Image (spheres, grey):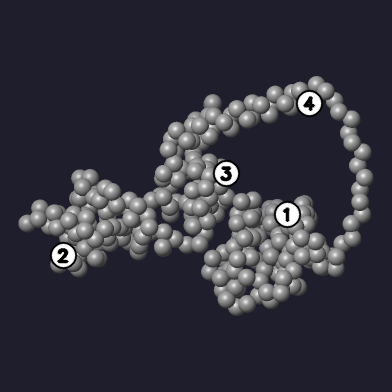
């Protein structure tokens, strides 16, 4: 009888696609405890597979060939930050663990149905990297080979440049007028931090800073965007989060614009303490 139930479960998954235990239990009229036990045995025997990502305490169960259907189901449930990490891995094809921010390292552990951990040895160094599921090992090997060749060429160029000393060009500094907005922003920053970097993106409208501040946990760096805009949008916050996340820093938005309630709710839900807003 149990053998028939095994076949029923497999046939159900083949027809319906990746399924949760509760759906299988209801459709086939089996109690949940027995369903869980049967699914565990089927996974152990290799007849079906289970997703790494869980919904409550349950995984999705599926058969060979349904991997893409499973990923499409899981994709709908990913959090905003998880989607950002997944997009990065997909675009770059593989990323070394050391190049991920602490936030990305945390979220990537929930993406094991989309990414695969690999240990890669380059010379005497060995490190962990994460590859997108469709990236082939040959692509990774080719990319690493090109990286090593580029580094070799750069070292050779550096050696030649050291042999031929160049006369330093004379610098003529041009005095730039600082807008009232910039003055106000930098007054705020100087009250709690030291400005390490500054880049004017749009004169009088958008400036990026890297600042450092002493905290109870030591010196912490922040990525700051000062933005003049009538009304701040969710996309403004998403863009700032992406920029700051790549630099592996918490973020601050300083603005004189309106912060709608739905934008503040979006910030709290998706970014929490990683992204702060200072209104001027």
- Nearer-the-camera pick, 234 or 49: 234
Image marks 3 and 2: residues in contact by CB distance under 8 Å: no
How far apart are the alpha carbons under marks 3 and 1? 19 Å
Q: Earlier in the sequence, mark 4 or mark 2?
A: 2
Which residue is at a point 21% across and 63% down the rendered structure image? 24
Image marks 3 and 1: residues in contact by CB distance under 8 Å: no
| 10 Å crowding of disc 3: few (<14), some (14-19), many (20+) | few
What secondary structure is found at the residue carrying circle 2?
Answer: helix
What is the number of callouts on the image? 4
- Nearer-the-camera pick, 88 or 4: 88
Classify the position of the N terminus by image quarter.
bottom left
Query: Residue 235: which disc?
Result: none
Which of pointers 1 and 2 indicates the residue nearer the eye? 2
Circle 1 residue:
210
Q: Earlier in the sequence, mark 1 or mark 2?
A: 2
| 10 Å crowding of disc 2: few (<14), some (14-19), many (20+) | few
How far apart are the alpha carbons under marks 4 and 2? 75 Å
Give the quadrant of residue 38: bottom left
Circle 4 residue:
161
Q: Earlier in the sequence, mark 3 or mark 4?
A: 3
Q: Earlier in the sequence, mark 3 or mark 2?
A: 2
Image marks 1 and 2: residues in contact by CB distance under 8 Å: no
Q: Is residue 150 above or below residue 275?
A: above
Query: Residue 28: which disc?
Result: 2
Circle 3 residue:
99
Q: Earlier in the sequence, mark 1 or mark 4?
A: 4
What secondary structure is found at the residue carrying circle 3?
Answer: helix
């Amino acid at each position: 009888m149990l053998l028939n139930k095994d076949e029923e479960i497999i046939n159900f998954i083949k027809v319906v696609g990746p399924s949760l235990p509760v759906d299988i239990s209801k459709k086939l009229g089996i109690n949940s405890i027995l369903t869980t036990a049967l699914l565990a045995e089927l996974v152990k025997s290799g007849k079906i597979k289970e997703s790494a990502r869980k919904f409550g305490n349950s995984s999705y169960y599926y058969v060979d060939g349904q991997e893409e259907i499973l990923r499409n189901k899981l994709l709908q449930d990913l959090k905003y930050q998880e989607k950002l990490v997944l997009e990065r891995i997909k675009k770059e094809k593989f990323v070394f663990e050391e190049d991920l921010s602490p936030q990305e390292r945390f979220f990537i552990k929930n993406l094991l149905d989309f990414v695969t951990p690999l240990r890669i040895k380059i010379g005497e160094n060995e490190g962990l990297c994460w590859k997108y599921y469709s990236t082939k090992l040959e692509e990774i090997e080719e990319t690493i080979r090109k990286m090593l060749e580029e580094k070799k060429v750069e070292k050779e160029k550096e050696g030649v440049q050291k042999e031929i000393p160049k006369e330093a060009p004379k610098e003529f500094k041009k005095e730039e007028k600082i807008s009232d907005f910039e003055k106000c922003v930098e007054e705020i920053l100087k009250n709690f931090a030291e400005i390490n970097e500054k880049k004017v993106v749009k004169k009088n409208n958008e400036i990026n800073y890297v600042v450092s501040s002493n905290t109870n946990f030591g010196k912490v760096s922040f990525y700051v965007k000062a933005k003049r805009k009538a009304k701040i949008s969710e996309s403004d916050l998403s863009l700032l989060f992406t920029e700051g996340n790549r630099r592996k820093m918490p973020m601050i938005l300083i603005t004189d614009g309106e912060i709608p309630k739905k934008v503040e709710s979006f910030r709290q839900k998706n970014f929490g303490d990683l992204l702060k807003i200072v209104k001027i």
